[in-house]
């Protein structure tokens, strides 16, 4: 939901051409006049509505607006009515009370293209097809059993990473870059049984490609904000061509992986990867609506964009907060080292015994949810939310970042205090609406188990094997918390720390 820089480039031209365009376009009826009780709204500008009020950090801009207009407010983003939710009470109404009415997705052009015309799970509008695909993912691809089956991958890649850091010690390590590479290696092996070492694409790295895809999906294209004629602006500004380049960049990679798995000469793998599973289901063809090669690639979109980016971002934020809070770091290291002993690596079987580790991960996900705005919902029928009338085809943005920092829900919400979760039943599994990292209701993230398993395992091993120091001359107060990003939000500056090998004797 970022206010895309291209928008600023074409806005003056668009405003100049608008009177001419209006001569050929019938103005749609103003539905709001038919609604007696609309949510509060900030003042709007003609044509663009509230688009000008979304800055480089939309989640923070929307939070500031909510301080004045309340936890439920109605914005017009171009011609698109958008309901913004900024409290746990209103989030519960959207994601539980009215879940069935609000569980679809807006069919934006960028999401349509990236997801192969909505053949995926995350971005697909609510339908019979979506229900079948979600069932497939939950049962076949992302179940606890399937996640456990890839433990050997995580362990092997973590061992390689530990060796790399050990060799680098005591020199500075760019954890932001290296965490992305580690997540890339793990996800690639889980998905297709091999690694590409970041060289999946002919031009540019996987990291650059993912950030570009996230930008495309989160940006407001003119076609979405002005449905009748915005596509002309997208073509003129180059936004359409940029989106097509992004799509084809990934499509070639996905096609390459599928072709490798369909090659009759490919040796039979010892372990079935995700593409193996999808191809088996493709040949089975028992799914309602049928699974196609494009469906497989659409699922890979979700796995790569969510699996690589969000897990690496979360570990980096966790290490950032631990570096800013030495008390928490020492307490976590003491728990892990006392529990694991001198084994040299934290096994996934050890994780269940590490209570404080889980508190640290929870607190990281509270303060730094990778997706600060949940994926947008869209109403399918007219309903009442917070006592206000909401029309069909209204987009809904739940501001998880604002809810996670709401002082009505959390004591000292800006502080990193893992102990707040001690003796607390609050979790991120969809039942507590003050903690919405993975969403809730029908559209809760199906990759929750995979994500938390990876983050806990990686973080545990990082703090178990090494003591981490700040670079020479740097103080704790110099550690930046400045954010950047669109669809997901990460540290603006890379996190560079000095690893010191821990002596277990």
Image: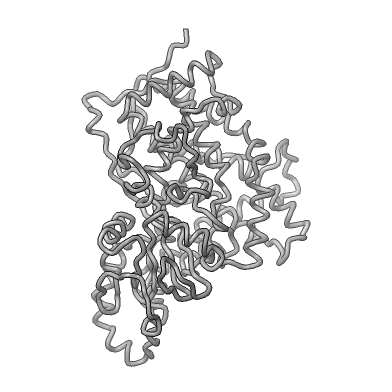
Picture coordinates of residue 184 (x, y %)? 51, 41
Tell me which residue sits at (49%, 42%) in the image.
Answer: 427
The answer to which quarter of the image holds residue 195 is: top right
Q: What is the x, y in percent for residue 411?
A: 33, 40
Q: Position of residue 130 (x, y in %)?
A: 62, 63
In the image, residue 469 sits, relative to residue 197, either above or below, namely: above
Residue 3 visible in the current orientation: yes
Left or right of 378 in this view: 65: left
Residue pushed farthest top? 505
When the figure is inspected, residue 1 is found, relative to residue 465, above or below; the finding is below
Outermost bottom residue? 23
Choose top left, top right, bottom left or bottom right for residue 10.
bottom left
- Residue 112 visible in image: no
Question: Image quadrant of residue 132?
Answer: bottom right
* Residue plotted at (41% across, 46% down): 369
Q: Is residue 383 left or right of residue 126?
A: left
- The answer to which of 440 and 70 lies nearer the viewer is 70
Q: In front: 387, or 501?
A: 387
In the depicted structure, whether residue 196 falls above or below residue 87: above
Q: Which residue is at 27% across, 83% downward?
A: 17
Where does the N terminus fall, quadrant-wise? bottom left
């Amino acid at each position: 939901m970022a206010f895309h820089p291209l928008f600023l480039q074409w806005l003056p031209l668009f405003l100049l051409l608008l009177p001419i365009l209006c001569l050929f376009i019938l103005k749609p009826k103003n539905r709001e006049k038919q609604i007696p009780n609309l949510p509060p709204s900030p003042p709007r500008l003609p044509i663009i509505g509230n688009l000008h009020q979304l800055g480089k950090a939309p989640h923070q801009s929307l939070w500031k607006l909510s301080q004045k207009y309340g936890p439920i407010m109605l914005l017009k983003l171009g011609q698109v009515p958008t309901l913004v939710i900024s409290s746990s009470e209103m989030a519960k109404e959207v994601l539980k009370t009215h879940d069935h009415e609000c569980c679809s997705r807006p069919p934006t052009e960028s999401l349509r293209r990236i997801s192969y015309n909505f053949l995926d799970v995350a971005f697909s509008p609510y339908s019979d097809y979506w229900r079948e695909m979600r069932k497939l993912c939950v049962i076949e691809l992302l179940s606890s059993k399937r996640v456990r089956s890839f433990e050997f991958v995580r362990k092997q890649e973590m061992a390689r990473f530990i060796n790399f850091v050990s060799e680098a010690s005591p020199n500075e390590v760019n954890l932001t870059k290296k965490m992305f590479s580690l997540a890339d290696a793990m996800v690639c092996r889980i998905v297709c049984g091999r690694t590409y070492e970041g060289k999946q694409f002919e031009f540019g790295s996987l990291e650059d490609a993912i950030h570009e895809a996230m930008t495309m999906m989160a940006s407001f294209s003119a076609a979405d904000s002005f449905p009748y004629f915005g596509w002309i602006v997208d073509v003129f500004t180059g936004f359409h061509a940029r989106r097509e380049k992004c799509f084809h960049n990934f499509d070639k990679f996905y096609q390459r992986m599928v072709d490798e798995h369909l090659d009759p000469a490919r040796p039979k793998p010892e372990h079935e990867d995700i593409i193996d599973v999808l191809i088996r289901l493709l040949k089975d063809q028992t799914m309602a609506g049928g699974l196609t090669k494009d469906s497989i690639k659409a699922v890979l979109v979700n796995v790569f964009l969510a699996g690589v980016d969000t897990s690496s971002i979360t570990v980096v934020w966790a290490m950032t907060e631990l570096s800013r809070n030495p008390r928490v770091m020492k307490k976590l290291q003491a728990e892990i080292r006392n529990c694991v002993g001198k084994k040299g690596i934290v096994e996934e079987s050890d994780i269940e015994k590490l209570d404080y580790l889980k508190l640290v991960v929870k607190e990281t996900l509270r303060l730094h949810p990778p997706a600060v705005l949940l994926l947008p919902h869209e109403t399918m029928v007219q309903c009442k939310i917070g006592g206000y009338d909401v029309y069909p085809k209204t987009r809904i943005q739940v501001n998880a970042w604002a809810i996670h920092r709401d002082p009505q829900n959390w004591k000292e919400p800006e502080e990193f205090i893992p102990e707040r979760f001690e003796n607390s039943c609050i979790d991120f599994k969809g039942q507590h609406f003050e903690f919405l990292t993975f969403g809730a209701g029908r559209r809760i993230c199906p990759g929750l188990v995979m994500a938390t398993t990876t983050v806990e395992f990686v973080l545990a091993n990082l703090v178990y094997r090494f003591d981490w120091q700040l670079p020479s001359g740097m103080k704790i107060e110099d550690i930046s918390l400045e954010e950047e990003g669109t669809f997901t939000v990460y540290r603006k500056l890379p996190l560079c720390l000095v690893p010191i090998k821990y002596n277990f004797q």
